[in-house]
Structure formats: structure tokens, C-alpha cells
Amino acid sequence: EGSVLGKHKLAVEDAVLEPWVEDVLRERSRAGEKPEELMDHLGDGYQGYAQMANLLCEWHAMLGDDEKALDREVRGYLKAVILRDFSPTVADSVFEKAGQTPQWLDKMTAEPEWRDLIYELSEMHPTCNLMQYAMAEISQKGLEADKAGPEAAAANLAIFRTMFREAMVALCDPSKEPSTDDLEDLKRLACHNEHAYVYVLSVLQSLSGEPLGPSMRRVAQELQRELASRGKGRQAELFHTAVSGGAAHTQACAALTSMMGTRKTNPSDILTLHKLYAGEGGGERPPARLMQHPAFLELLVQAVFDPRVKTNPSFQDQYDFLLAYAVSPPGGGGAVEDGGAFQATSEAIKRVRQLSKEDAQTLPDHVMLVLREGIEASKVCSMGILLWLGGKLCEAGFYEPGGGFERLAQPYVRVIQHIVLTHPSQREWVLGMLGRVWALSLEMATEEKVHAMELSVDMLVLLLRQGMVLRCLSVMCRWLPTAEAEVQRRCLVGVLGAAAPPYSLRFVAAVLGLFGVMQNLELLHHQDSKGLVGEFVDHVREQRGKYNLDDDANKALERAIAVSWA
């Protein structure tokens, strides 16, 4: 029976390519089968599809087709077939039977394209022993194991550590502008499963006493928010409480969790926290860091400053106290320093809160002075002012006749400009607010629309001048197709007026992208814009080879060259 099965197995299509063929040949030889007969069986089943594919590729090349393109097409097809038909059970069986690293696996890990296939397979089959071994080999050889996805990384601590280290380096790199993509990469890695989450959380907690401690705590808080958004808020709370030592202050944690769970403050929990942090119970005050969770700080800032959020005036002092305590440096034993930063912050919060809650309809010089002092005194006051004034700018009625635009727009803009210049960390919030203003403007009548658009563009140019160049240019490319003609011209004038040669490659590509979305470049033929545009176009035309323009950028440049800028 064994002989019949062996012969039948050798007769299957392309048996010579199967991993078990050597075992069957060895078995049949020992059973007395003649080599000629074994070769006949192999020859009967031989189809030679792989060799035929190579022959067809050679014919195409002889006919003039691009060899590299042919190779890409064949490789792409092979990858698709492997991804479709790959069986982790069969792969593990072959791998375990071989007892050593297959030569073909070494060749695959050595080539970037086939490594990408291994990354995909490891994502699809994270428990496959062969894939885990391949990923470990890639990591050991230093061959970009950080490209693995969270599924593959979670199954291999060495790969996970490499990816985690790379994610943290990217997130904390002081030489580049912070990117939300870096934080998203870390979220995907850390929140893949509970083991990964606790590991990352423990590392961040161990770094909380270092110079980057506040940043590490902030990252941990963002991870908690991410896990909560995935429906695991309770688990996230328990993990953070255990790792951060919050278990010693259950009453404070319960009050904070209650408010973050309902996404609103309430007098009962506020009074509980005030009693604990003011030391009225006689026990040890909880650490201020418990209140520094972004979700709770956001609720507290809204309750104190945002006129749209109604709070009971009887408890306003308790709100002010808790906000000042949360953002002020703690003193010895968890208490706030007497008369120091806490007192100054508390007074600034009260002054700004009185103006914002009253929703002042005019901003005379003495009010502007209070706002300026508040901005310079504390980031939290600055954020409160943004919530107040930004909320007004995001109301359609503000731009209507009598709505306040003529009277208040310029003072509001001056205050927000001061915030942008004073607190770089709040520029991202301002950028988001401008996006909301622009979206709102699209539903307005023409005159109000122009007011809102011009305000948005002017503020966007200010952010660009402060270093958010590529972010702002990307936003402008999305805005310009829907902008009024004068707003388009104003935008280009602002961008080109803020820059001078030599330009970066990405800057040139982005500005030409702005040209590309404008239907009529003649709009730029204006006294205060044609000089700037003409100088830019002449410079890029002369240095075209240096900037390595793609097809779309070249088309936009040719359109601009066709216009006379004299």
C-alpha cells in the first residue's frame, strides 16, 4: 500500500517542486524502486509552470517590454497567490520537519520586497511558528523588523521592543515638529492587547521621574483615552490606577472616574475633590497628577471658562481652586506652595473666568490687558480664552450684520495671535478651530463668507510663519478650491510673503499645488501679488532641475510661466 501511495504522490503535478519529494524518493529507493522508474513518475507529473512563466517573460523582453516591469508583475501575482493560499498549518509542518532554516527563507528575508510579504503574512497569521521565526530572523539581522504590524510585534518581545523604541524616538524627537502620526503609531502598538498596553504603561511610568516625565505622563494619558475609545475604559482605568499608585486614593479616583465617564462635571464630585485637595478631611492630599488627565482637565477648563457650559455659581470657587491646583507645581507632601505659582495661577484664572463667563461684548484696553496677563500667567488661562473666543468665531451669527464681527473680530484675532506666539503647544488647537470656521463659511452668504475666509487665511499664514509650514500648506490646498477669488489671492500673497529662496523641495511642491487648484492664475495679477508670484515662478523655472518636480507640479509651473508677471 505504501508503494502505491508513494508512486501516486510522485505522479502529481510538479511533484518535483514539493517539499516532501526528497522523503518520498528516499523511501522508494530503500524499497527497491529503480531510479529510472522514479524519474519516469516525476517526469509524468512535471508541468513546468514556473519555467514556462520565465520563458514567457524572456519572450516579452525580446519583444521590447521593460524587464523590470515584467518582474514586478510576476512578483506581484506570486505575492497575491501566496497571500490567498498560505496555510499556517502546512507551513509549520514543513518547517518542523525540516529541522533547520530553509534556504529559501534566508533568501526571502534578504530582499525588501519579500520581507514585505513576510510582514503581511505575519499580520494575517500571528500564531504561525514559521512566521514568528522569520520575524525573529529579520529582527536579529537588523532588517527593518520595525515595519511589522502590531499583531506580529505582540507575539515577539524583541520585535515589540524595537518598534516601541522607534515609536518613542519619533515621538520625542526635538529636531522635528510633533506629528499626530507618530502618536497614532504608538497607539496602534500599545493598544493591540492588554499585555502590550501594561508593558508600555509600565515603561512610561518608570520614566515619569526623568526630565521628560510630564511628556511621558501625557503620552500615557493619551493611550488611556485611546483604550477607552475602544470600549475598554474600565480596564484602562484599572491599569492606570495600579501602575500610577492611585489605588491609595480611591475616593479621588472614584470622583474623577465618575465625571470622565459622564463627560461632565457635577457639584457632588467637585465638592469631594475640593475637600480632599484642600486637606479638609485631615488626611494626606492626593497627588495633583490624578487631576492632570486630559479628559478631566478638558472638562474642568470648559466648566470654568466656556460661557456655553453652565455651572452653579455657588461652586465656582471650588472649580477655580481645583483647576489651579491641577496645573500648579505641587510642594512638599503633595500640598500646593503657599503664595507661589498656585496663588498667581488662581488669581489669573478668576480674572479671566469673570470676563469669559460674562461673555464681554466689548474688549476695551483694560480688558485686553487682563487677557494678555492671563495668557502670560498660565497655559490653562490661555486655553480658556481660546475656548471662549474660538467658540464665538465658530458661530455663524458672529459674521452676520450686527453679530459682532465688525466690532470684535480684530480684538479677538489679536488675542489669539498673542496665544499663538506665546504657547506653541496650543497652535494645533488654533489650526483645528480655523478648520471649523472655514467649514462654517461654506454655508454663509457671500459677504459673511468672505469675512470668515479672510480671517481663517490670515490666521493660517501666522501659523505658517511660526513653523507649521507644510501642515498649513496642506490645509490651504484643501481650502482653495472652495475659496472666493480674492481669498485665493490673499492666501498666495501670505504664503509667498512669508518665504524667500532658497526654498525646500516640499515647499516648492506645495506652492505649485496651490497654483494647481486655482482655476484662474490671472487673479494673482494684482499690484501687491504679481511681484511675489513672478519672483517665485522665475526662481523655480531657473532651478527646475534642482526641485525634481513631478508631472502635476510641472503642469502647474507651465501654467504659471504662461502668465505675464511683468
Image (cartoon, rainbow, N blue to C red):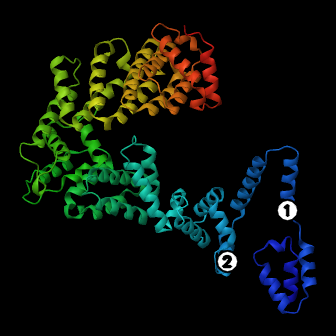
Q: Which residue is mark 1?
A: 51
Q: Position of residue 443 (x, y in %)?
A: 48, 21
Near mark 2 (Cα within 10 A), the count class, few <14, some 14-19 or many ≥20, is few
Is residue 379 visible in the rendered structure shown here?
yes
Give the side of residue 393 with respect to residue 333, left or right.
Answer: right
Q: Amino acid at mark 1?
A: Gln
At label 1, counting other C-alpha atoms closer than 10 Å, the crowd grade (few under 14, some 14-19, many 20 or more) is few
**Looking at this view, is 279 or 142 the one in front?**
142
Screen quadrant of the C terminus: top right
- Relative to residue 125, is residue 42 depicted above or below? below
Q: Residue at x 83, y 92 (%)?
A: 30
Q: Quadrant of residue 465?
A: top left
| Gap in angstroms between the C-alphas marked 1 and 2 | 27 Å
Give percent across and percent down for residue 164.
43, 59
**In this orientation, which residue lies closer to the viewer: 246 or 416?**
416
| Mark seen at residue 188 | none
Earlier sequence position, callout 1 versus callout 2: 1
| Rendered view: 540 above or below 284 | above
Quarter of the rendering containing residue 133: bottom right
- Location of residue 46 with respect to 27 vertically, above or below: above
Q: What residue is disc 2 on?
A: 93
View extreme (bottom): residue: 31
Quick one: SS at disc 1?
helix
